[in-house]
Amino acid sequence: MLAKTHKKNAENVRKMLLADDALDVGRVVRREGDFVFFPLKKRVEVDGAEFVEGLAQERIEKPRSLKEALAGVLDVADLSLVPSAYTVIGDIAFLELPDQLLGRKNIIGEALLSCFPNVKVAALKISQVDGEYRVPGVEVIAGENRTETVHRENGCFFKLDIATVYFNPRTGSERERVSSKVTSGERVLVLFAGVGPYAVHAAKRGAEVWAVELNPDAVSYMRENARLNKVDLKVVEADARDVKFDVLFDRVIMPLPKQANNFLDVALSCARESGVIHYYCFAHNSLEAVGDVIETAGSLGYKTEILESILCGTYSPCLNKYCVDFRTSKIKA
């Protein structure tokens, strides 16, 4: 079914159809002469339009961007506010919207699904990553009503719930970089392990892996992910500062840049002589990141041999995320 209207009324009719969630964004708006034909999901009464029988053409090619999917659906002013960045985890895509577009969140969610044929859920980020467990607030706005998914990364599978645990798919290549340095038989400690991506990748390399995580939901998923990927992990549900180990580690991974400086003493005390630490932090530049490691470790009585400083991403216009890889040894009195 189509809503037919004169082109001079088209913008008002489009807005009314959107307000009633009646416009079918998966089909093409057709123009013939002075008339515009809007494809409908359901029949609603709209001033200035009449209903005619017919089926609008489906969008044959998937849109190349969210803005392209919403062209002709949102007006020019709203379209300019549509974000170009969104995140896909498993078969869930989620994004942030400015306040001006929240009234259009469902139609934007449907358009987001049209961009990714394999995505089944569109979700809205309604609060920033925050709190003890670093979990963002999310709301499903289109597709299946769920927040649990399975994400595939570098040949591994990670089951998780985006509403209860933290997971960043953009660091997959960095996790692969770190795991590529792991050798069979190493003892590896992963602090702030989340649902286990670093831990599982290291275990796949033949390492003996201990993984520490405070969030009980993440711990549950990490244990399940160990089973999914057929690896053994020694999972510890605790605050990293409260855990005591009776072994020292060849490699310590610290994927919590926001509080890394507060836990470097823990990592140093767990590493064997000449052990390697992968230290993630936020800094303005690589020199600052390396200097932070050298200064903090030195104040704790440790020498450092810097191996690499890797730019891992951008946190804000002024801050970047770095991983500083270094060897550590105790300063002898």
Image: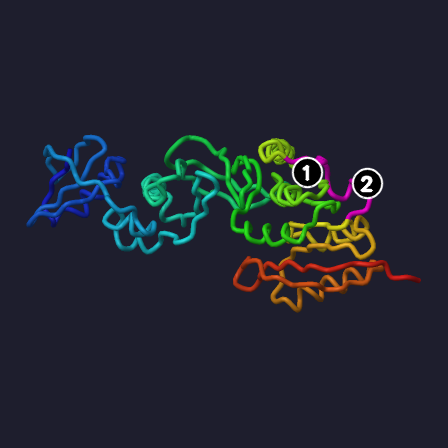
The residue carrying mark 2 is 244
Q: Residue at x 22, y 31 (%)?
A: 42
Residue contact between numbered discs 2 and 1, judged by CB atoms under 8 Å? no
Which residue is most to the right?
Answer: 333
Coordinates of residue 17 in the picture (x, y in percent): 22, 39
Q: Residue at x 26, y 50 (%)?
A: 71
Q: Which mark is residue 214?
A: 1
Mark toward the viewer: 2 or 1: 2
Q: Nearer the viewer, residue 302 or 80?
A: 302
Which residue is most to the left?
Answer: 33
| Secondary element at tag 1 | loop
Q: Residue at x 34, y 51 (%)?
A: 65
Which region shows up in magenta? Answer: 231-249
Indicate the quadrant containing the C terminus: top left, top right, bottom left or bottom right.
Answer: bottom right
Coordinates of residue 266 in the picture (x, y in percent): 78, 49
| Secondary element at tag 2 | loop
